[in-house]
Amino acid sequence: MMATTFVSVPVKKSSEVDMAKPLSKFIQATYPSGDTQAEYIRAAEELNSLRKNALGRPLDKHDSSLEILLRYYDQLCSIEPKFPFSENQLCLTFTWKDAFDKGSLFGGSVKLALASLGYEKSCVLFNVGALASQIAAEQNLENDEGLKAAAKYYQLASGVFQHIKDTVLSALNREPTMDISPDTVGTLSLIMLAQAQEVFFLKAAADKMKDAIIAKLANQAADYYGDAFKQCQYKENLPKYFYFQEVLPVLAAKHCMMQANAEYHQSILAKQQKKFGEEIGRLQHASDSVKTVASRYDEYINVKDLSDKITRALTAAKKDNDFIYHDRVPDVKDLEPVGKATLVKSTPVSHPMSQKYTDLFAKMVPLAVQQSLSIYNQRRADLVNRLIGQMRESTNLANGVLASLNLPAAIEDVSGDSIPQSILEKSKVVAQQGGLQTVDQFMRDLPELLQRNREILDEALNILDQEEVSDNELKAKFKERWKRTLSSELYKPLRAEGANFRTTLDRAVQADKVVRERYATHREVIALLCKPEAELNAAIPSGNPTKSLQGSEVVMLLKTLLASLNEVKKERETFENDIKSVQFDMSSRFLAALAQDGAISEEAISVTELDRLYGDHTESVQQNLKKQEELLAKIQAAHEEFSKSTQSNTDANQREEMLKKLAAGHDQFVELVANLKEGTKFYNGFTEILLKFQTKCSDIVFARKTERDELLKDLQQSIAREPSAPNIPAAPAYQTAAFVGGTTPAVPTPAPRSVFQPKPQPPARPPPPSVGATLPAAALPAAPATGVPAPSASMPASVGGVGMLSQAQGPPYPSYQGYPGFYAMPMPMAYNQYAYGQYNMPYMYHPPGQPPFQTAQPPQQPQQPQQPGYPYPQQQFYQQ
């Protein structure tokens, strides 16, 4: 079987994210304490561990590693409809690096951080496709099991990349990194499909299937590879990976190789059909394709075996045709195209993908159901409150009417100097509930509770304000580089929620003001009801009502009507308890609607169910209210007749007015206590809501700060990698090496940095260019008796001593060897062509009789002497 190469995709890398903490906070804020909440929190911790296993370590190229990724992806799909993942609710920021970006010399790589679960799903799915391609590339294609596994994984990878292409833009609210862009993953999907088709071709060839089928499979693979090659070639926004990591040449080579295989097997079919000319034409076409691969892409694809096989077949076919058949060989363009057969298709992505999937949050209902339940509960609460409110209002109305008529005290006051029984009972109720002390305590507590709620709300909004100011400053500094949602836009829902909370608190303040005014109006009467019986009796004026009316028909009628009214009020208490106790699990109803229709029509379902649950109670309440209305009308008529029958005198009127005030004071006390208790309960409950709101604001700001830090880090690395100037200006002339007579610039020979073994002498170089006019031999000074040969007449006046570059700028006097005043300058540690001349020479001793600066030359030696003051071996120089 031929040696072949398959393209595999690198996996993306992700930063660590703590999913357990924010999910647990949401669960604690949403679900009541108990076993269910604890179970959900454990599931959140398990999900966090699953992410660490899937993304926090390198994965082996094995089925088990792929299974971990698939399980994590399935869990993401299951929690997506159950948690409100967004920037302004449950904010979790996921950071992923570009799979194809290898960073730069300064570190870092292209990465993107988004608070989007869809982004996390797309990146995890990309790793599924990448790992599947790597597992497929590791399979042994020499056996049937390896071929089947490779085909399966390539088709899975193709389907995964195709799914990302279709969904990635809708899952993100901004441009993705290049590796998961639609063009990139679309090309990867096609490459994986081509490789799966090639594997099927290899299996068909190994199984020795019919040549017609094998040719069609190979031709289809060639078609896929050709399409993938075109996409890589013409898509300018694809990663450099496709161009510099051997992908593009591999695709081109595979296209030619598959065409060669298709033509080869089709030539066998032509031979079987006695079409010998077509056989030769197809073999020639196959040979040309293989030669293209061998000449251009030999380092990527080895086609020697295929080439030899085609060459042998072509040689044999030509020989037979030349000697036996003499069939005309058609031109390549005249050959009938080879058919195509597709045995592969992209594996569709469907949830669940894992074979061992178990929903960690199976008992948690989807977010759509949660929202519908929340709206339903609000509708139910409004209905219940309306019914209870109507009944309590009717009770207050009845008590007010009776108090204004001094009933039942008027028909109980027989002596005129004792406290009526109803008033005594009312006084006892006030005293038992604490009287003025209870009301005063509530009145002192309310402002403290109000202030606490305001401080929590102010602190929550202040957190948003501070982060928004910081974000605006960074936006003003980096401008278009600051690519993330503005805090002012992101926090609009939170600020609207905070404004609603503040409005609610303002309404509560107005309600507290009304309660205080009522309390101030009735405080004295309530204080009177709290006094002992003797003091209360003394405070009530005496009167002389007609004792003869106590057994009259009108009094008996009033007593009967009052008894009926008391029964009506007690009946309402029963109704209130029944209404509060109604329970029904609407989650199953909403889940059924979601499963059936794919959406929930909350209003229609809720109205229908509320009418079914509370229809009878609503009708009973209305009948009760109507009955009370009729009783009050009869009581007022009977009292009017009773009033006409009594004697009218001043004392009796004063006594009656006092009894009315006491009855009204009792009613006001009961209502005040009830209102203050509700106010206290409201403030305490509102504190919990505001604390959750504050936590939400803190979590979002924390996530924003994390995102800000990541973005700042990326910006810093990006700015560091940018060149300071687009074009570096040319160096000025004085910085460049000097040109002498238009020749090559002088480049000094660097001094050696370490001791090396002596190398062979280089060949003699040509003489350096002449600087001045050539001196005649007679004009040259005589050589001193130092053993240094005099320069020849043809030698130009050198600039510098032996070993110096002749074209370097020298002092304004001759300094060649042998001239009086020549000084062999010690070579510095690093060569400097300007470091010579008499002005920077160190003071050196010279013997008497020698010219100044003339160094004593040692006797002629076979080897050149060490340069003075230079601790390393002397550099070799060319003899002049």
Image: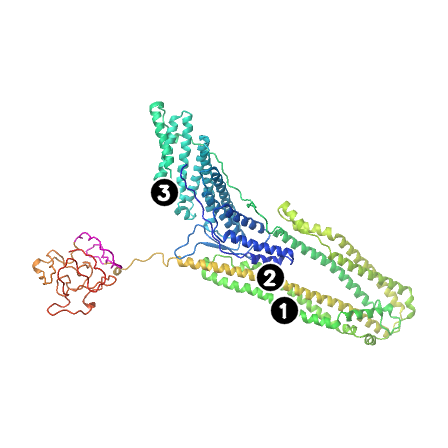
Going from N to C along the chain, the mark reached first, 2 or 1, is 1
Q: Are marks 2 and 3 in contact (CB under 8 Å)?
A: no
Q: Give the percent coordinates (x, y) of residue 201.
A: 45, 36
Q: Which residue is mark 1?
A: 451
Quarter assignment of residue 673? bottom right
Going from N to C along the chain, the mark reached first, 2 or 3, is 3
Q: Give the percent coordinates (x, y) of residue 721.
A: 39, 57
Q: Which residue is mark 2?
A: 693
Quarter assignment of residue 187? top left
Amino acid residing under circle 3: Glu
Amino acid residing under circle 2: Phe
Task: Tell me which segment is drawn in magenta.
Answer: 738-766
Q: Is residue 587 above or below residue 472?
A: above
Identify the residue at horizontal 68%, vertical 72% (top origin): 444
The reply to whether residue 632 is visible in this rendering is no
Q: Is residue 783 left or right of residue 48?
A: left
How crowded is the residue under tag 3: few (<14 C-alpha within 10 Å), some, or many (20+)?
Answer: few
Amino acid residing under circle 1: Gln
Q: Secondary structure at mark 3?
A: loop
Q: Are marks 1 and 3 in contact (CB under 8 Å)?
A: no
Q: Give the percent coordinates (x, y) of residue 501.
A: 62, 63
Which dot marks residue 299?
Answer: 3
